[in-house]
Amino acid sequence: MIVAWPTKLCLVPVFPGNSHAVPLNPEIEVFISGMAEKHHFNPSELRRIFSQVKPQPEVLRAISAPATALPWSEYRVLFINPTRIADGVKFWDENAESLSRARQQYGVSEEIIVATIGVETRYGRNTGTHRVLDALTTLAFDYTKRASFFRRELEQFLLLTREEGIDPLTIKGSYAGAMGIPQFIPSVYRRYAVDFDGDGKLNLWESPADAIGSIANYLKVYGWKPDEPVAVGAQVSGDDFRELLLQDIKPHVQVAELQKIGVIPVQEIPGENLVSLFALGEGDEARYWLALNNFYVITRYNRSNYYAMSVYELSRAIREVRETRSAAK
C-alpha cells in the first residue's frame, strides 16, 4: 500500500541546547491543550518534551511499504526458518513454567505464545530502534491517512509513561510505536498487559513472563478457544469458490456451504463450523486454507493473513521439534 509522501514534515523540533525556542507545530499545541484539559498534564512540561522530538521520515517510508507487500514465499522465509524455530524451542525451554501457567490460566497453547513472540521480536532480541515518541508524533501529525489513530496512540503513550513513571523520551520501539517483547502499541499495553511474574510491575521490555501472560490475556479477550484448530488446508475445484476468497477475514461461511461449491477440507471439520476461505501464493503455487476462529483471533494482533499463518506455521514447527526431541529421549 502506497500513500502520498509529504514534501515537508510539519514537525518543528527544538533540540536541547538551542538558544532560541522555535514554536511548535500549531497542531501539536492543540494536542497539548487537549492533554492538559482532559488528563491534567502540565502544558509546559509537554512543550519541553515535544521540543525534543525528532521528525522521522524513515517511519513514513516504512509504514507505507509493510512487509506484507512481499509475495507469500518471500514473506514466509523471514519467519519460518531453522534459526527462528531453534530459538523458539530454546525460549520455550527457558520459560516453560510461565508458558504452562499461561495455558492453564488463559487457555492459549504454549506454541502460539512462543511463535507470536518469535514473529514479533525474535524472542525479545529485536524490540525496535525508533524512539517511540518520535515515531508516534511523526505518524500523528504527518501520516494523514491514519493521523487520528496515531494521535490516540500518542495520547495513550503519554498516559502510560506517566502511570509507569517512565521518561517518554527514553522508550524505543517499532516504527509504528509498538513496544517491548510482545510489541504492544500503547493502548493495548495499558489495557491488556499483566504482571505475570508477580513483581508488582508491568514490564514488557525485560520480563518474558509479563510478555507471555500479556499475549495470552490479549488473545483470550479476543476470543481464543482452547484446543480448537487454527487453520485447515483445503482442496478446491471449479470456479464458484473464487467469489468467496477472503470476502471477510472473520469466519462467516459454513464448511458445509463451501463443500457444495467444491471446497473440501483436507481434515474433517464439522459442517456447521464457520470459516473464511483464503489463498496463499499465486497461480499454480496457490494453496487454499480455511481460517477458523483462532486464526481470526491471531489477526486481531496483526490484521494480515500472512502474519497469522506465519505464527501458526512457526508454532507447529516449534512444537514438532520439541515433541521429536522428547520422543528420542
Image (cartoon, helix red, strand yellow):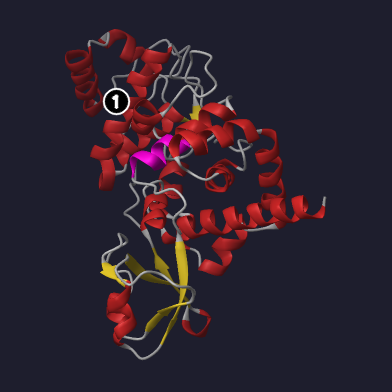
273 w.r.t. 125: above or below: below
Q: Is residue 94 visible?
A: yes
Q: Which residue is painted at 40% across and 34% down in the image?
A: 185
Q: Nearer the viewer, residue 13 or 31?
A: 31
Residue at the location (44% across, 25% down)?
Answer: 194
Identify which residue, 1 or 52, lies in the foreground: 1
Q: Nearer the viewer, residue 23 or 167?
A: 167
In the picture, measured across the screen, residue 24 lies left or right of residue 103, that is: left
Q: Say which quarter of the image contains residue 304.
A: bottom left
Specify few, some or many for label 1: CA neighbours under 10 Å numbering under 14, 14-19, or 20 or more. many
Q: Is residue 73 above or below residue 51?
A: below
User: Toward the viewer: 321 or 242?
Assistant: 321
Q: Main SS type for the magenta part? A: helix
Can I make out residue 180 in this image? no
Magenta-drawn segment: 215-222
- The residue depicted at 18 percent of the width and 17 percent of the height is 38
Residue 272: image quadrant is: bottom left
Instruction: Quickly name the residue at label 1.
Output: 155
Point out the image quarter for the N terminus: bottom left
Q: Amino acid at mark 1?
A: Glu
